[in-house]
Image: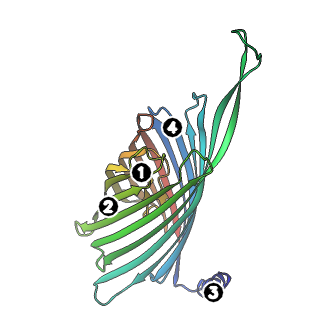
Amino acid sequence: MRNVVTLLLLFLAQNTCADDWYWTGSAQTLFKSYNISTELDSLCGIAASFSADYLERSGFSLGYSLNHTEYKPHFDTGIVEIDERTLYLGAHSNHHPNSLPGVLTLQLGAYLGKDSIRSKSVTTTNTSPGPGPGGQTSSTRRFISTDDNYEVVNPVISYSNYRKTFYADLGYAFSHYASDDNNTDDLDVQQWTPTLGFAFNRGYDWLQLRVYWISLSNSNRVAGKKSTSALETKWIHWYNQNKPSYLHSTQISVLIGERRYAVDSDSTSLFNIPELQTAAFSIGGTWVLAEQTNLLALGGYERYENPSVDDKFNAIYMFAYLSHQW
């Protein structure tokens, strides 16, 4: 491993001074509010990432995110808050086979992280032992911290023609969750995501369809539902020279069906909450703030179910992503 790292550093040192590298740095923030949920209250998150591409042949990326989830405060026992920390490592390689009129890309992403869960419990003790109704009791509240560790591997093979009017990929993800809590089972998740994309309207519009097929191992985390499926549709429109001031593109995304513990390879994000997502909608746009500097802003609505406690609720969120390339 040390030799591999040394060779990588030498390779980077020999090429970083050339004009063959394209570097991108980004920062993002997310705020989500859960409505009519009996348990969840809100989520806020931040993330930063860095990526480099070499002559459009290959590249790598590194990212780190932190999400904080607050639970409803009126419960005497149960989860109070969760801090989710995730490290992301990714690499890709582009190939130009003679048999295909386009680019074949091999991509591999890996996630490593943990959910630090803080819960409270109440212990009742008898302060006046002895028979009869005159005994007195006292309650002691204490907080317990447990970790839920997870590892995710996400390879994707994709194809795009040279005109950039057609795109297809097949993604696979394997996720493993292991908790310090003996009452929580380990969980293995397998996900397949075939995707198709088409350009139309002289390249000013893009339509993408992605299917999520997710199977989950037998665990008390999933309440007996061991498979889910969903369809995500995304439309993007780019503006020409008559575009609104600084507005580069707008987009709308709709998800129907069900998914749980999903992996999104486009945004390199994980959906780690155990609740079942049953629908989602988002709308937003990308603004050009300066040369090579863009801002993506999204607002969205989601629906969830928690079969374990018969809880159906929704969430609204705001998301902002700032990137700069040099």
Query: CA–CA distance between discs 3 and 1?
Result: 40 Å
Q: Which residue is mark 2?
A: 210
Q: Which residue is mark 3?
A: 7
Tell me what residue is drawn at x 58 percent, y 31 percent: 73
Residue farthest left in this picture: 201
Tell me what residue is drawn at x 49 percent, y 57 percent: 321
Q: Position of residue 147 (x, y in %)?
A: 63, 50
The answer to whether residue 207 is left or right of residue 79 is left
Q: Is residue 282 above or below residue 137?
A: below
Q: Is residue 263 above or below residue 170?
A: above
Query: CA–CA distance between discs 1 and 4?
Result: 16 Å
- Look at the numbered discs 3 and 1 and tell me whether their residues touch, using CB distance below 8 Å: no
In this rendering, which labeled residue sits more in front, label 1 or label 4?
1
Query: CA–CA distance between discs 2 and 4?
Result: 28 Å
Q: Position of residue 148 (x, y in %)?
A: 59, 52
Front in this rendered view, residue 179 or 280: 179
Q: How is the image coloured?
A: rainbow
